[in-house]
Structure formats: structure tokens, C-alpha cells
Amino acid sequence: MERIAAAARKAGRDPGAIALVAVSKQQPDDRVDAVLSTGQRLFGENRVQEAKARWRARRELYPDLRLRLIGPLQTNKAADAVAFFDAIDSLDREKLARALADAAQKQGRCPEILIQVNTGEEPQKAGVPPSDADAFIRAARETYALPIKGLMCIPPVEEEPAMHFALLAKIAARNGLSQLSMGMSDDYETAIRFGATQVRVGSALFGPRT
């Protein structure tokens, strides 16, 4: 949190505008409980079933807990994700948008949603291509009436992340979106410089996954 605050001040930003998402996927329970004991209440998980197994009981103990789904979501898990998560940060295709909208209508609730943009256009990675982002954002809002709050990206490992963060911020700005989920353990301070409102930190908090 001190490093996030320092990076924010250096960028002329309010540290309070940047949320730390503790990425707890595949971490052992003792490490998760250790981070919970510090007061951290915002966590990111990659898989619906793993998250439900880890957090269902803990939600009774921590009513202020907030969970974000940050991994790819299969359409057949859309209803479970809508019921369980406070936010879904990985909307990336129209079929999933339709499934989320249907689930939200049936359940009478909808988590906030971020659209994942594949800024590096990597074939193995989920996300909307940057050239399709504006049209997809419009469809998610207008056709499916989803509460789109912002964008998320995961830059290519071998490339300088700054240009990807700048691209995501540009797409968000022209579509009036205020949330930017970008930056991980190795590059979150750079992401803050480019406007990140959420940084997803795993190994720097929990240590390497076993």
C-alpha cells in the first residue's frame, strides 16, 4: 500500500483512487488468511468453482469482503459467477455478454463488469481486439444493458507494458469509462502512472505459487 501511494503521488494522483486487488488464485489457505488478517478485503480469483470453495465460508466471517472474477469465464458458468462475485472483470465476447445478461435478469442482480481488451492481440489470450473495443462496449451497454464500469488488460510478457496501459486508458476515455484494471506484481507502479484504478497483485503479496 505504501508503494501504491508513492506511485500515485509521483503521478499527481490521489492514492485513495487506486484499489489493491489481492490475487488469491491457487494460493494456500494459510497465506490467504494471513492477508485477510491485515485488513485486506478485496480479492481476485480466476475460477468460479475455486472461488466458491475458498470464500463461501469466509464470507460469513468477513461481511465486507469483495470478490472480483479476473480470469476467463465460460458461458456455462455465467449464472454462478453473477450469483457469487461482486465484479466480473473479463467480459470478452458477445456470447458471454448474452449469458451474463440472461443470468442477471433471472437473478435480479448483476455484478459490475469490466471488459477485457487484448491490447497485444495475442491469439492465446482472451480479450476483445482494440479495433473492436468501441463497438463491443456499445453492444454490451445498449444491446445487453450490462453495467460496464471499465476495462481490463494483461500486456504481453515480453513487451513494454506502458504502451498497453496507455492504449487501454485511451479506449476507456473515449467511451466514458472510469475504471482501469491494469498492472500486476512487476508493473503496477507503471500502470498507476497511466491511470490504473485497480492493480492486481499476487506474488508480491502472497509469495510464489507452489
Image (cartoon, grey):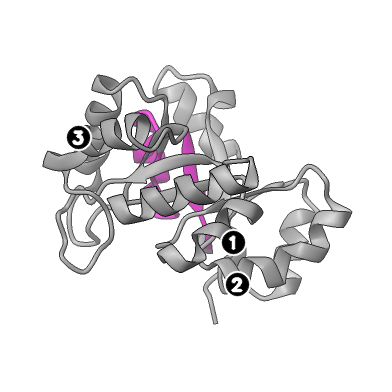
Q: Nearer the viewer, mark 2 or mark 3?
A: 3
Quarter that holds the C terminus: bottom right
Alpha carbon separation for disc pair 2 and 3:
31 Å
Going from the N terminus, do you reach mark 1 or mark 3 first?
A: 1
Q: Which residue is mark 3?
A: 135
Residue 57: which quarter of the image? Answer: bottom right
Vertical order, 44 against 208 (above or below):
above
> Tags 1 and 2 in contact by the CB under 8 Å rule?
yes
On the picture, is 98 further left or further right than 155? right
Tell me the magenta residue range. 181-202
Crowding around mark 3 (Cα neighbors within 10 Å: few <14, some 14 to 19, many 20+) is: few
What is the secondary structure assignment of the residue under circle 2? helix
Q: Which residue is mark 1?
A: 80
What is the secondary structure assignment of the residue under circle 3? helix
> Where's residue 201, x and y in %?
51, 53
Alpha carbon separation for disc pair 1 and 3:
27 Å
The residue under the point 71% across, 46% down is: 41
Alpha carbon separation for disc pair 1 and 2:
9 Å
The residue under the point 74% across, 47% down is: 65
Q: Which residue is mark 2?
A: 49
Residue 148 forms part of the magenta stretch: no
> Where's residue 82, x and y in %?
57, 52
Residue type, mark 2 in image: Gln
Crowding around mark 2 (Cα neighbors within 10 Å: few <14, some 14 to 19, many 20+) is: few
Residue 200 forms part of the magenta stretch: yes
Vertical order, 174 against 139 (above or below):
above
Residue type, mark 1 in image: Asp
